[in-house]
Image: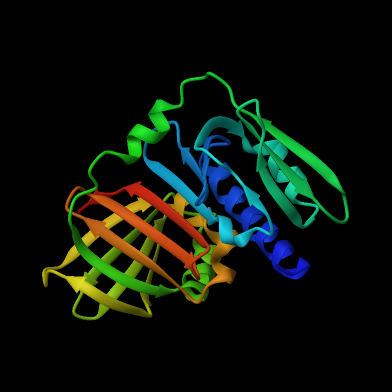
Amino acid sequence: MSERASVWTTRILQKFLQVLASINSNCVLEIDKKGLRIVSVDDNYRCVGEAFVSQRAFSKWRISSRLSMNINLDFLKKVLSSNASIEEVRQTVKSGIEVLFGEPIRMTLTIRGNVEDHSKNTEFLQIPIGAIIFDTMIRSHELGLFLKTVGQACDEIGFQVDSRGLISSTNFLNFTTLKLLSSEVRKWDTRVLRFSVPMRYLSALLPVLNFTDSLRLCLTNRDIVIVLLQFGRKYKLKLFISSRIE
């Protein structure tokens, strides 16, 4: 793998951590032969963030068994901010992992396992999310522009699905915004849907929206909104957000 590809992996991972840290900086890292997975759950259990990076995204991957550990993202974000290439990820004999960075820092980072309980993070994702009743693809740039425009002023972002398509809306004091989003509806049960989610969770996606042309947004019959961003087969980011149905 080229050095340029390694730097690209570092930058995507850096942006993933920005998203997850905005939900909760205390996360669970799970790593095995297939790659690494980081799960973040906010304190109110309104949102779960899950990032996955395939082992194929790294130059050298030497993980022989599954490991799970609690980590705090604050320090790891600072290390990745150098944009150094990740040259190798390997398992240590002490139930930890080592990450070898190349230029410009030339450093080995050791992440050790601990005995803290992380069951709340993994068990939350095992709760059935239900059947999908609405499924669409949204242009990332368009959603990002809308979030930058109104995201600081509003606590909630609403969505309405009708014969016109997907409409996003916000309310602040005596102001109301309505925007018809360019979307490709894949599934819809033909009735008018109205649902909303806290603005902070969608705004958390701003660091990664430039990496992809579109994102997938789904609503399940258990009132959970699923947001999926996928970059090829190596990188995936999901948010599971508890929604309010109107």
Q: Residue at x 53, y 71 (%)?
A: 145
Rendered image coloring scheme: rainbow
Q: Residue at x 60, y 28 (%)?
A: 95
117 or 137: nearer the eye? 117
- Residue 81, given in percent of the width and then of the height, sits at 76, 51
- Residue 134, given in percent of the width and then of the height, sits at 22, 65
Q: Residue at x 48, y 72 (%)?
A: 140
Look at the picture and state if 225 lies above or below 24. below
Q: How many marks?
A: 0
- Residue 205, given in percent of the width and then of the height, sits at 52, 58
219 or 55: nearer the eye? 55
Q: Which of the 4 image quadrants contains residue 3? A: bottom right
Where the N terminus falls, by quadrant? bottom right
Question: Which residue is the extreme one toward the top?
Answer: 115
Q: Is residue 209 left or right of residue 173?
A: right
Q: Is residue 95 left or right of residue 166?
A: right
- Residue 141, given in percent of the width and then of the height, sits at 52, 75
